[in-house]
């Protein structure tokens, strides 16, 4: 027989905050942090690219690519929309990543259409059968 009850923690209060290795390390270096930051800044100013990268990664967020809006003819067949995406890709108006995401979305749309069609066919079979 198990002494543990399902859904009930054996240690409801958990480990107390500030007792882990990371907390102890933070506490140990807390007084040195301004000197460490100053050393990294000085190294970066002296041409140390690793130090510069550390500073920039922490202070200046990386730019994320923004996709340009794409207008597709929603009344067209999905295959026509797919061809249109490939044409935009070949013309350089879309990047490969954006084209792949749009084509995956078109594939998902196809799956939804097929599912709706199967549901309708099943309803007809159940009604008439």
Image (cartoon, rainbow, N blue to C red):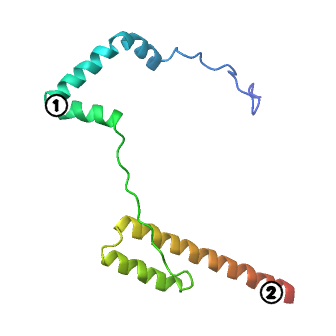
Residue 110 placement (x, y as % from top left): 57, 78
Q: Residues within 10 Å of mark 1 (few under 14, many from 20)?
A: few
Residue 26 placement (x, y as % from top left): 42, 16
Viewer-proximal residue among 11 and 111: 111
Circle 1 sits on which residue? 48
Quadrant where the N terminus is found in the figure: top right
- Residue 26 position (above or below residue 77): above
Q: Residues within 10 Å of mark 2 (few under 14, many from 20)?
A: few
Could you tell whether 60 is left or right of 71 in the image? left
Disc assigned to residue 125: 2
Element assignment for label 1: loop
Residue at 70% of width from left, 22% of height from top? 12
Residue reaching furthest to the left: 46
Viewer-proximal residue among 31 and 125: 31
The reply to whether dot 2 and dot 1 touch (C-beta < 8 Å) is no
Residue 10 placement (x, y as % from top left): 70, 23
- Residue 128 visible in rendering: yes
Quadrant where the C terminus is found in the figure: bottom right
Q: CA distance from mark 2 to mark 1?
A: 73 Å
- Residue 44 position (above or below residue 70): above
Residue at 52% of width from left, 70% of height from top? 105
Viewer-proximal residue among 33 and 114: 33
Which is closer to the viewer, label 2 or label 1?
1
Residue 31 placement (x, y as % from top left): 36, 9
Tally of marks: 2
Viewer-proximal residue among 19 and 45: 45
Residue reaching furthest to the bottom: 128
Could you tell whether 2 is left or right of 83 in the image? right
- Residue 129 visible in rendering: no
- Residue 26 position (above or below residue 44): above
């Amino acid at each position: 027989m198990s002494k543990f009850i399902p859904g009930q923690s054996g240690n409801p209060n958990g480990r107390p905050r500030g007792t882990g290795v990371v907390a102890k390390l933070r506490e140990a270096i807390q007084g040195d942090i301004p000197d460490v930051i100053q050393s990294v800044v000085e190294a970066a100013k002296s041409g140390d690219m690793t130090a510069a990268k550390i500073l920039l990664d922490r202070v200046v967020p990386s730019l994320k690519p923004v996709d340009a809006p794409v207008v597709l003819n929603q009344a067209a067949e999905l295959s026509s929309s797919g061809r249109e995406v490939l044409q935009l890709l070949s013309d350089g108006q879309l990047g490969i990543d954006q084209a792949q995401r749009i084509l995956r979305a078109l594939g998902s749309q196809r799956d939804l259409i097929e599912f709706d069609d199967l549901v309708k066919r099943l309803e007809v079979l159940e009604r008439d059968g």
